[in-house]
Amino acid sequence: MAQENPSVTRFREYIRIKSVQPDPDYNSCIEWVKEQAKEIGLEFDLIHFELQPGFAVVLTWKGSNPDLQALMLNSHMDVVPVNPSKWSHDPFDAIKDDDGKIFGRGTQDMKSVGVQHMEAVRNLKAQGYSPQRTVHITFVPDEEIGGTNGMAKFVETTEFKKLNVGFELDEGGPCPTEQFGLFYGERALWQIKVTIKGNTGHALNFVEGTSVEKLQKLMNGFLTLREKEKEKLSDGDVSRLGLVTTINITMINGGLQPNVIPPELTAVVDMRVTPNGWTEEKAEEIIEKIIEESGSDITYEFINRNPLIPETPINDENPWWRCFKRTCDELEMKLLPMICPGATDARFLRSKGIPAFGFSPMNYTPMLLHDNDEYLEEKIFLKGIDIFTKLVRNLTEESL
Ligand SMILES: [Zn+2]
């Protein structure tokens, strides 16, 4: 049998480290990354946040002109839990089958990308290339649980500011077709809990102004909005999901006993607000209008209200996009720009005004993030290293 490509061997090693939530083995990840950095010849820095839990790992390849804004390549080290009985192979064995499929938790989300970032730099160093801009390859914890002790805090530190990041690449998603997905923005999670008070009494009467009647109006209001947004996706193309706002009523609670009109009901509404044509003001106005039109004695509070962060422009005014696009054109790659329907660490960079794209080079690959039998084909993984090699080369030139 032919010798395995060492990049693939390293990828499989990283998959075998159980950095699985809720108790990820970060120490082994850090040690492993440190070993890689030493081999490649990159500066290694483990940054612990002052007076609070959390950390970030930064590998640095200094550019010849360190005053230029740097390129940051970020991945998260943690992976989501598994249900091993539903997997065809042990999710932490990194088994490679006869077709070259490598099975394991994190093969798509997103240990593959972390290894590709390092392998690209390893390639460029071997080619004798020296960048004008500095490259920072970062590894952060806890993305899968909101990033609170990872990127959310890291971007607030002085250590982060010193990195002088001009552009960040973070996680994207696979595409089953020849296309490569690219996230240039994200939706914002909003969840509200609505409390509806109404007249109570014996259920044998026609009591006026009940909480249930108000709930009916409230539900109609939100479901009409849901229908309107859903219609915009009439072709069912999920790659466009991020362009609309989803609205779902996810919890309804209340009632005292079968023969009493409930004096109070609560409903939870989950909204993923798109930056595409929406603003926070617009979302808030819509919520308030629906509530007002549903009747009196209705209040609401936010369970979650994440900021709606502007997208990173994908037009010629953004030099990083121009360079990224030109590189993809050179490689004859078809890009599929999308607004990410969920959330990634890239939002913390965008909130600081730093342009960021979510890019995991995985075409011809089914979407198996957080799913059973997550896998990545060896050849797709290796192609991804070539893509990053070209990207890092072009994105580290002074004139982009
Ligand atoms: Zn991820």
Image (cartoon, helix red, strand yellow):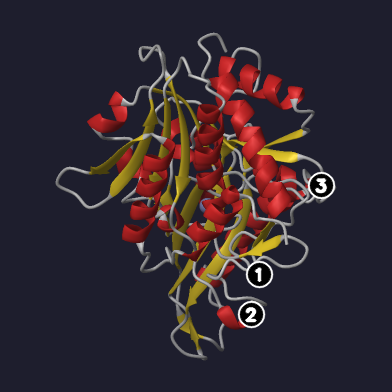
Whether the residue under disc 1 has CB within 8 Å of ligand 1:
no
* Residue at position x 66%, y 35% in the image: 386
Task: Find disc 3 in the rendering and name its residue.
Answer: 177
* Residue at position x 50%, y 46% in the image: 114
* Residue at position x 60%, y 12% in the image: 317
The first of marks 1 and 3 along the sequence is 3
The first of marks 3 and 2 along the sequence is 2
Considering only vertical position in the picture, is 253 above or below 122? below
Task: Find disc 1 in the rendering and name its residue.
Answer: 373
Residue 103 visible in the displayed image: yes
Q: Quadrant of residue 277?
A: top right
Residue 243 visible in the displayed image: no
Task: Find disc 2 in the rendering and name its residue.
Answer: 86
- Kind of residue sitting beneath label 2: Lys
- Kind of residue sitting beneath label 3: Thr
Callout 2: helix, strand or loop?
helix
Left-right relation of 338 to 189: right
The first of marks 1 and 2 along the sequence is 2
Question: Where's the N terminus, which quadrant?
Answer: bottom right
Considering only vertical position in the picture, is 286 above or below 23? above
* Residue 73 position within the rendered picture, expressed as x and y whole percent measured from the top left: 48, 35
- Tell me whether the residue at label 3 lies in contact with that at label 2, contact meaning CB atoms closer than 8 angstroms: no
* Residue at position x 51%, y 19% in the image: 396
* Residue 51 position within the rendered picture, expressed as x and y whole percent measured from the top left: 14, 46
Q: Quadrant of residue 36?
A: top left
- Tell me whether the residue at label 1 lies in contact with that at label 2, contact meaning CB atoms closer than 8 angstroms: yes
* C-alpha span from label 3 to label 2: 26 Å
Left-right relation of 78 to 385: left
* C-alpha span from label 1 to label 2: 8 Å
* Residue 156 position within the rendered picture, expressed as x and y whole percent measured from the top left: 28, 35
